[in-house]
Amino acid sequence: MRHAPRDYSLTPLNIYWEMTQACALACRHCRAAAMPHAHPGQLTHEESIALLRQIPQFGDPMPTLILTGGDPLERPDLLELVDEARRLGISVSITPAATEALTRDVLERLRDHGVSGLGLSLDGSTAARHDAIRGVLGTFGRTLDAIGWAQELGLPLQVNTLVTAETAPDIPAVYELLEPRGLARWSLFFLISVGRGTVLEPLPPEDGEELMRWVHRTSRRAPFVVATTEAPSYRRVAVEVLREEGVSPEEIRRSPIMRSFGVRDGHGVVFVSHLGEICPAGFLPLPVGDVRTDSLVDVYRTASLFRSLHDPRQFGGRCHHCQYQQMCGGSRARAYAAFGDPLAEDPFCTYVPPAYAKLVEAAG
C-alpha cells in the first residue's frame, strides 16, 4: 500500500533534540559551542518527558527523533528518555560524541532499549586530520572502534563528515576508509559558520560545485547512501548531471536524489535546544517558541518564521527566481549566517536562474 507523500509544512521528517550542552570534546566547528558541564537551565527530566509526549501530536507519519548535543551520553536519564520515546511509538536515533564514555556496552544497551540508528562523525582519513578538528587526541581511534561495534551489533550507522576548505582535499580518502565498513549512510556536512565554526574556512562555492559532482559520481558506486547536509543545491547539481547524461525526466523522478526533495531548515527539520527553544534547525538558531510553554506542533505549523520557510516563493534573490526552488530552496542557515536573513538567497550556490539573469540584464 502506497502512502501519500509527507507534507513537510505539517510534519517534519526529523526532530533534532539537543539534550545537553555538556561534552568532553572541543570540536573546532561545534554548532552548540559545547561545554564540559550541563547548562543549569537545560530541560529537566520531567520537562523532557513532556517534550516527548508532544511528538505524537504530529500524527502519522510520526517524525524521527534524533538525540544530539553536546553529547547525549552526558544525560544520566538518557535510557529512561529513550524508553519513554519508544513507548510513545517514536523512532529514535542518537549522535554521541566519541569520548571514553562511548563503549561497545553502551551501544549494545542503546540498541536493546530500542535506538534504531547511530550517527558518528569522521572528519579526516587519519588520526592527525580528524583529531585536529575534534580537539582531543584519540577520537579518531574511538570513532573507528565505534563504527566497528555498530557493525557487529547490527545498529544502522550514519557517518557525518565535515566539508571545509581544509578538509575537502581529504574527502576521497575518507570515503576509501569508510567504503568497507558497513555504513547505512554517509553525509557530507558543508560548514555553516555558526558557533565555533566561525574559525574555519568554508569551501568556495565553485569548489563546492565540483565536490558535489564528485559526491554524485561516488553515490552511484558506493555500497551505502551518500548524501549532503546544508547543501541542498546538490539536488540541482545531481539533476543537471543526469540531464547531461541523457537520463529521461521519468528516470530522474525515480532517482534516489529525489528522496530528499524539498527538505531544508525549518521544512522537514525542526530543532529543540537544550534550553527548550524551538528553532528551524540547529544551524539556524532563531528561537520562535519554547517547549516548556508552547506546542511544538503549533510552532512548527503556524509560527511566522516557519510558515515563511515552508514556502520557498518567499525566498529572496536568486532563490526566489529559481526553477529548482521547490526541490532545493537553498540553505536557510547559510543565508542567515551570510546576510542575517533566513529568507535570503543561498550564497553557496553558483547557479544563476534564467529569470534572475533577465532581471539583472533589464536593470542594466
Image: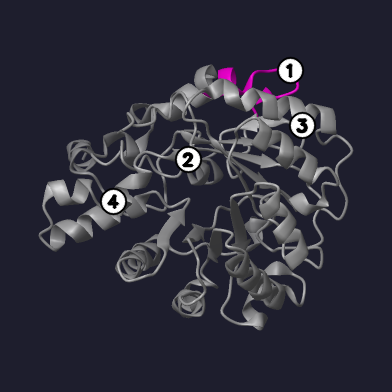
Task: Bin the neighbour count of mark 1 within 10 Å (Cα to Cα): few under 14, some 14-19, many 20 and up.
Answer: few
CA separation, marks 2 and 1? 26 Å
Q: Secondary structure at mark 2?
A: helix
Using residue 219 as the reference point, say whether residue 182 is left or right of it: right
> Which is more foreground, mark 1 or mark 4?
1
Residue 266 in magenta stretch: no
Residue designated by label 4? 236
> Which is more foreground, mark 4 or mark 2?
4
CA separation, marks 3 and 1? 13 Å
The residue sitting at 17% across, 39% down in the picture is 358
The residue sitting at 60% across, 33% down in the picture is 89
Residues at marks 2 and 3 touching, judged by CB atoms closer than 8 Å? no
Using residue 144 as the reference point, say whether residue 4 is left or right of it: left
Q: Tell which circle, 3 or 4, labels the residue nearer the N-terminal end.
A: 3
Residue 190, percent across and down?
49, 58
Residue designated by label 3? 48
CA separation, marks 4 and 2? 16 Å
Q: Which residues are magenta?
A: 287-300
Q: Tell which circle, 4 or 2, labels the residue nearer the N-terminal end.
A: 4
The amino acid sitting under disc 1 is Thr
The amino acid sitting under disc 3 is Ser
Residue 290 in magenta stretch: yes
The amino acid sitting under disc 4 is Arg
The residue sitting at 71% across, 41% down in the picture is 82
CA separation, marks 3 and 4? 38 Å
